[in-house]
Image (cartoon, helix red, strand yellow):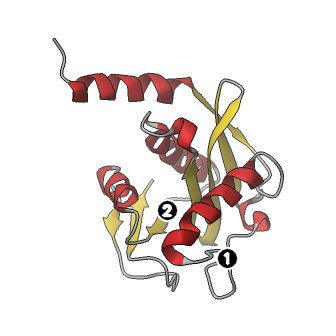
Amino acid sequence: MRDDSEMTGEAERRAATALQFRPADAGEPPARQLIEAMVDELDRFYGRIDRPGMPSADPADFSPPTGVCLVGWLGAEPVCVGAVKRLGDGLAEIKRMYVAPAGRSQGAARALLGALEDAARDLGYVRVCLDTGPRQPHARALYLSAGYREIPDYNANPAASFWGEKDL
């Protein structure tokens, strides 16, 4: 008989396999609604993360040829979003990662992170970085388990407490 952690791992693998990632315009549905849901959810922890003084995360930042926004679909339902933006030569930043409640605890976040890393690599980046705040320990744990190493603050994000970087 399998224990719960093995069954959870199996369920996560099945769900992650079922996810289909498609490029999307971050300023248009469904990406816009998913990003707005993330901003609203984080508001209770940090205040508005889309306010002046925060690192740039406009839809234009996530547009080709230097960026991309991906929406993850489970069947006909959009359940996650994330984006890549250019920071410098060979360096990109992963932004606006969000998994809607319907997609949580199924491996969607890990699958999304992998899809964003692949997209960054496809855009010619050799390193990616990201940040997360102190009220998101699950995100920090995901990033560390995916091979991100902690680095100093690179973007002056007042809501962040962890900054990570990974070679692609």
For the residue pair 168 and 49, the one nearer the viewer reads as 49
User: Looking at the picture, does residue 72 appear above or below residue 51?
Assistant: above
- The residue that disc 2 covers is 128
Q: For the residue labelled by badge 1, is the local secondary structure a helix, a strand or a loop? A: loop
Q: For the residue labelled by badge 2, is the local secondary structure a helix, a strand or a loop? A: strand
The answer to whether residue 152 is seen in the rendering is: yes
How many numbered marks have been drawn onto this rendered protein structure? 2
Circle number at residue 56? 1
Residue 80 percent location from the top left of the image:
60, 44
Please give the name of the residue rendered at 61% of the width and 79% of the height, measured from the top-left corner. Answer: 55
From the image, state whether disc 1 or disc 2 is nearer to you. Answer: 1
Quarter of the image for residue 166 reads bottom left
Please give the name of the residue rendered at 67% of the width and 43% of the height, measured from the top-left corner. Answer: 71
For the residue pair 25 and 12, the one nearer the viewer reads as 12
Residue 51 percent location from the top left of the image:
68, 81
Please give the name of the residue rendered at 49% of the width and 72% of the height, measured from the top-left corner. Answer: 45
Residue 139 percent location from the top left of the image:
40, 57
Residue 44 percent location from the top left of the image:
53, 70
Residues under labels 1 and 2: Cα distance?
16 Å
Name the quarter where the N terminus is drawn: top left
Quarter of the image for residue 64 reads bottom right
Please give the name of the residue rendered at 43% of the width and 71% of the height, measured from the top-left corner. Answer: 133
The answer to whether residue 95 is seen in the rendering is: no
Q: Amino acid at mark 2?
A: Val
Circle number at residue 37? none
Q: Is residue 100 left or right of residue 29?
A: left
Q: What is the residue that sits farthest to the right in this orientation? A: 28
Q: Amino acid at mark 1?
A: Ser
